[in-house]
Amino acid sequence: MYNDILVPTDGSESSTAAVNQSVSIAEPHGATLHFLHVIDVGTEMAASGNIAPELTQTLEQEADEILDAATTKAEEADVTYEQTVLEGTPHEAIAEYSTDHTIDLIVMGASGRSGIKEHLLGSTTDRVIRSADTSVLCVRP
C-alpha cells in the first residue's frame, strides 16, 4: 500500500511523534521513509552581513541533528530511509518533494516549533494539506 512515505521534521514534539508513527507504518509495508527538514529561508535567513554565514552553518547543523534523531529510529526498526535538507518555504518544499519523489503518504506533526498551543493545526501542516496532492496524516504527540 505504501512504498514511499515523506516525513517532514523540525525536531518538535509533534514531529518526533510523526517520526515514530511513520516508522510503525513503514515497517510492515517495507516502505522507504523520506525524512525532510526544510530551512525556512523566509524567516530563518533574514540575517545579513557577517551573521549570515554563521547562521547558515548553525541551521545546517541543527538540521543534521534533527535528521540524525529521525534516522536512528528508522535504523532501530530496520526501515529503509533517505534524508534531505532543503531551503525554501516549508509547505512549498514539502509539496514539491512529495510530487517529485512519488510519495504515497505524508506523515507530519499536527503543529510544529511555533510553541503556540492554541492552534489546532500548525500553519505549515495546514498549508501542506491544502497544497499537496498526497494524503497527509497529522500526528499529535
Image: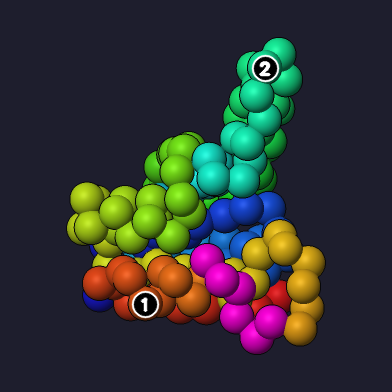
| Residue type at tag 2 | Gly
- CA gap, disc 2 and disc 1: 36 Å
Seen in the image, is 20 located left or right of residue 137?
right
Find residue 84 and report its image quarter: top left
| Residue at position x 60%, y 35% in the image | 45
- For the N terminus, the image quarter is bottom left
Residue 87 disc label: none
Q: In this view, does 63 lie above or below 89?
A: above
- Kindly state the secondary structure of the residue where label 2 is placed: loop
Residue 106 x/y as whole percent: 40, 67
- Kindly state the secondary structure of the residue where label 1 is placed: helix
User: Is 101 a magenta residue?
Assistant: no
| Residue at position x 62%, y 53% in the image | 10
| Residue at position x 56%, y 71% in the image | 123
Residue 41 x/y as whole percent: 53, 40
Q: Which of marks 2 and 1 is nearer the N terminus?
A: 2
Seen in the image, is 122 located left or right of residue 94?
right
Q: Are marks 2 and 1 in contact (CB under 8 Å)?
A: no
User: Is 121 a magenta residue?
Assistant: yes
Q: Name the residue under label 2.
A: 49
In front: label 2 or label 1 = 2
Residue 37 x/y as whole percent: 52, 46
Majority secondary structure in the magenta region: loop
- For the C terminus, the image quarter is bottom right
- Residues drawn in magenta: 119-124
Residue 109 x/y as whole percent: 59, 70
Q: Mark 1 points at which residue?
A: 130
Query: Label 1: how many residues lie within 10 Å, few (<14), some (14-19) or many (20+)?
Result: few
Seen in the image, is 24 located left or right of residue 56?
left
| Residue reaching furthest to the front | 49
Residue 67: in sight, yes or no? no
